[in-house]
Image: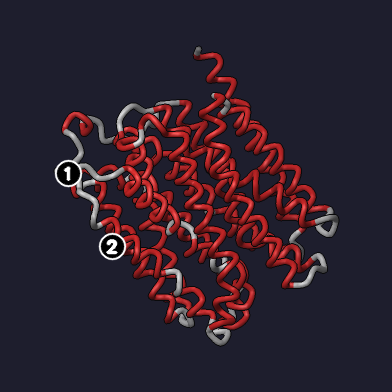
Amino acid sequence: MKPVPRALLLVALVLAAINLRPGITSLAPLIERIAAELSLSRSFISLTTALPVLCMGLLAPLAPRLAMRWGLERTIVLCLGLIGLALLARLAAHQSAVLIGSAIALGAAIAVAGPLLSGFIKRYFASQMGRVVGWYSLGMAIGGAGGAVFTAPVTALFGDAWHLGLAIWAMPALLGVLLWLWLPNQAVAAEQQESGGLPWRQPRAWLISCFFAIQAGLFYAIATWVVARYHEAGLSMLRSNSLLSLAMLMGLPSSFLLPWLAQRYNARYPLLLACGAVTCSCLAMVTFMPRFVPELWAVIMGFSLGGSFALSLVLPLYEAGSPLAVSRWTAMMLFTGYSLGCLTPILTGLARDLSGSYRLPFAVLTALALVMTLVAWLLGRNRRQRR
């Protein structure tokens, strides 16, 4: 079998990563309009964000088993195909059942693809993990930011047809299918199949999962509701959307830069701690002083959230030895992380419905960011004790 050029492998990885977020973040600029047009409550419409995240958690443990059966590369092809079909289904998203069903399909595909892409990095880029994870997380940040930034303009371009603005994101997924079909499919080596379970008995796996759960919950709650929070505080809808776009865009440089710095200076845990503290401070400003230089806090918060997500992706790569073992650690992280994190946007919307204001739910998000900072400190402390 002729070796595949590293550059092509990296392009395939980044393209797959780009497709893991737009199906979720593209809803944020339109969520209030969709809720009003379909006569849905905020807690119900938040399911379009929460259900994919829940599926991304519950179904993640299937990833290593599917890779053993079909091969890592072909399983990823199937995931990209399902993402494309789910997004095409949003052409009929004026039916709320279709909107919710597409969200479930998206979550299922992302659930399986996420752990396998980490294993893909371990298989082909074991000596360059920090740099390649930087590209991987940058791809996800591009997809997430693209969904948040371009959906509203694309919707306007299509005559204000929001279902077309949502369905357009099927195009990069279908392009990803074509590229990944070019890659040779490699079966998992027999020696890597000895243990099919997840590392439930590893305390560090639980700490990593806890950190991931909180940062994921914060990201999806912010992506879903921060526009509404700013608008409630008196900012125009245009400015509120621009603040979300700014935060998403700032995840691009941090997603690439922080994993690189973490590997170069062996500073994963100090950087995790800093990201947690900065996120907590920015959320406090959004909660209590949303009109005070909001662009500054959006920039800093986007940078810290993007960085904390990218750094959390690095952690399983340093805890496990083989590609399949990395997939298992990542599957546990995603399973526990997303299963818990999916509750955050739902509870945020429910708290808004009950309290009549976004101030209380955002105060709770600020407290969660403080807990995330504590977990980052414990991860670094436990690592020092093990030396």
In the rendered structure, the answer to whether residue 326 lies left or right of residue 355 reads: left
Q: Name the residue under label 1.
A: 2
Colouring rule applied to residues: secondary structure
Q: Mark 2 points at which residue?
A: 178
> Which residue is at the front of the view, 350 or 262?
262
Residue positioned 56% across, 71% down in the render: 151
Query: x, y (%) of residue 187?
Result: 18, 42
Q: Are marks 1 and 2 in contact (CB under 8 Å)?
A: no
Screen quadrant of the N terminus: top left
Q: In which quarter of the image is residue 331?
A: top left
Structural crowding at the residue carrying mark 2, measured as other residues with C-alpha within 10 Å and reported as few (<14), some (14–19) or many (≥20): some
Q: In which quarter of the image is residue 79?
A: bottom left
Residue positioned 27% across, 59% down in the render: 78
Query: x, y (%) of residue 285?
Result: 79, 50
The kind of residue tagged 2 is Leu
Q: Which residue lies furthest to the bottom in this view?
A: 159
Res. 90 in view? yes
Residue positioned 81% across, 65% down in the render: 233
> Which residue is at the front of the view, 67 or 170?
170
User: In whole angstroms, how far apart are the C-alphas of marks 1 and 2?
Assistant: 19 Å
Res. 350 in view? no
